[in-house]
Image (tube, grey):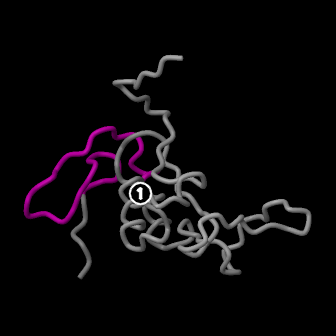
Amino acid sequence: MTYSRRAVLAASDLVAFTVHDLKRDATTLRFLGGSRYTLANYFLLAYPYGQPLVYDGFVFPTANTGQSPPADAGGFVTDTNCTNGAWQCITQSTGVKGMVGWHNATAAVTTVSDFTATSSVTSRPSAAGPPRPPSR
């Protein structure tokens, strides 16, 4: 079997930096990464490429990466419940909800521009209107 990496990725590609198979071994960024994990999710939603996947996963202690996800008496994984502490639910955070809205509002624009060394505002012009200055 031959493996080859595509040089040009499709806009329909699913883009994620962690999934349940990868978050256990600490080789990828995961919810235990705190603010870096949150920032990575913001970037995933801000960058104009592919279909982003923001992942809610179950909580496990650092020392127990072999722990199974929350399950019912029959051994079936329970539905995600963001109120019981067994799941980390970044999709429920105000920042991620805002970035999902921004991503959807600017989805038609495929380039990022207006980067300057002194600006703290990034925009994708013409889709979401002019950039607003950061609130103070």
The number of callouts visible is 1
Q: Which residue is mark 1?
A: 102
Magenta span dominant secondary structure:
loop
Spot the residue most to the right: 74
Comparing 63 with 50, the one in front is 63
- Please state the horizontal and vertical placement of residue 63, each as a whole percent of the image: 56, 74
Asked if residue 9 is positioned above or below residue 91 in the image, the reply reads above
Which residues lie in the magenta part? 103-130
Question: The residue under label 1 is which amino acid type?
Answer: Trp
Residue found at x 8% / y 59%: 117
Which quadrant of the figure has residue 40?
bottom left
- Residue 47 at what x, y percent from top left? 34, 48
Taking 119 as reference, is 65 left or right?
Answer: right
Foreground of the two, 109 or 84? 84
Residue 80: in magenta span: no
Q: Say whether residue 2 is left or right of residue 84.
A: left
- Residue 113 pos. (x, y %): 20, 46
Left or right: residue 26 compared with residue 122:
right
The reply to whether the magenta stretch includes residue 119 is yes
Seen from the viewer's position, the closer of residues 129 and 46 is 46
Tell me where residue 66 appears, x and y as whole percent: 64, 64
Q: In terms of secondary structure, where does tag 1 sit?
A: helix
